[in-house]
Amino acid sequence: MPMSNSWFCLHSSENETDLTHAILSLDNRGLAYGDGFFTTMGVIDGQILWLDYHHQRLISHQKALQLDVDSHSLITALITHAQHLQQGVLKLIVVRAAQAIRGYGYISNASGSACDVWLKSSAMVITTDEQLCLPDGRLIPIQPVNRAICLSAQIACLPPPLAGLKSLNRLDTVLASAELQRIKSHSLPSDSSHTPAQPSIEEGLLRDMNGCWIEGTMSNVFYQLADTPVPKPQSLESKNIIDTVQEDSNYLMTGQWYMPSLTQSGVAGVMRQVIIDALSNTAYPVIIRPLQDDDLPLLRRLFFCNALRGIMPMANLTLLNENVVTMA
């Protein structure tokens, strides 16, 4: 087993006998072209969270990128590593093997689909202090309520089958995340001993090149709409808002949730699919609907989600014009 916080080669196309000492070549296609994909898995008590959904991602991504991955053997290996880790995060990267031809292309035979598989095991605590129960009985962590902000950075529109994939091509998200970090650093109080009355900025909402709001910098987004703008309360104290969300055990099952389409951009996240499936047989299955500029003042509820943090509800959203939309 590899040491925690170290990269380990699970499978090498070079048939290495000692995979613990496999070396990443500068000819690696993930490094040169982003030719591969990754997934990040939380581990609690030696069990991989949402393992069946991560397995689905492995199958769909290897098919889309024409990679030869034995997903069942890989899942077996991941389960073993999770049992060794017990608590933390596994990050898996699958990269097409170096090719015998120059340039972007790859050989049109079995060797062209060969791949290298890398794994990083990181010990950490996955926060699950507060959880919501899904209709099927499974639990989703819910984080303390925070704030979100619309970012000026945009994410790329991609052709099928690339849209929705968690590929290694993430430069648009890198720049967007850097913008969010700058905003967060500037919003910190000058007096570090002072605790602000309202929640902190946690996530940024991103548009694609068509101008539709698609997702967060590290998450997918779900939203509810009101018929008319919701009046802003006089106080945005985080404790009151957090208590409201946590006391509402039907948070996910009350009202109509929408989500943006990912047919042209964005990443189809694991937690996004968990929520879609969980609500599919309820009175309000999730509806795919574009999130446009005109919709933002009408937002009634908004949350981001990912496989590690679960649901991240937002108290308000700061628009590009600096107006603030407050959630009910």
Image (tube, rainbow, N blue to C red):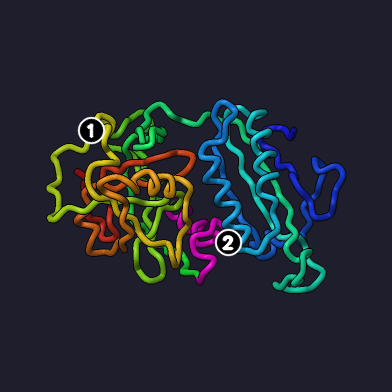
Of residues 237 and 272, the one nearer the viewer is 272
Q: In the rendered structure, are the residues bearing label 2 and label 1 in contact, judged by CB atoms less than 8 Å apart?
A: no
Which quarter of the picture shows residue 130? Answer: top left
Q: CA distance from mark 2 to mark 1?
A: 39 Å
Query: The C terminus is located in which quarter?
Result: top left
Is 233 positioned to the left or the right of 77 in the image?
left
Give percent across and percent down for residue 158.
Answer: 50, 69
Q: Name the amino acid type tagged 1.
A: Thr
- Name the residue beneath numbered marker 1: 244
Query: The N terminus is located in which quarter?
Result: top right
Q: Magenta segment range?
A: 159-181
Of residues 194 and 63, the one nearer the viewer is 63
- Name the residue beneath numbered marker 2: 169
Q: Would you say residue 238 is visible in this rendering?
A: no
Above or below, 138 relative to 267: above
Is 320 positioned to the left or the right of 31 in the image?
left
Mark 2: give few (<14), some (14-19) or many (20+) Cα within 10 Å.
Answer: some
* SS of the residue under disc 1: helix
Of residues 31 and 285, the one nearer the viewer is 285
Answer whether residue 166 is magenta in the image. yes
Which residue occupies 34% across, 65% down?
A: 212
Q: Name the amino acid type tagged 2.
A: Asn
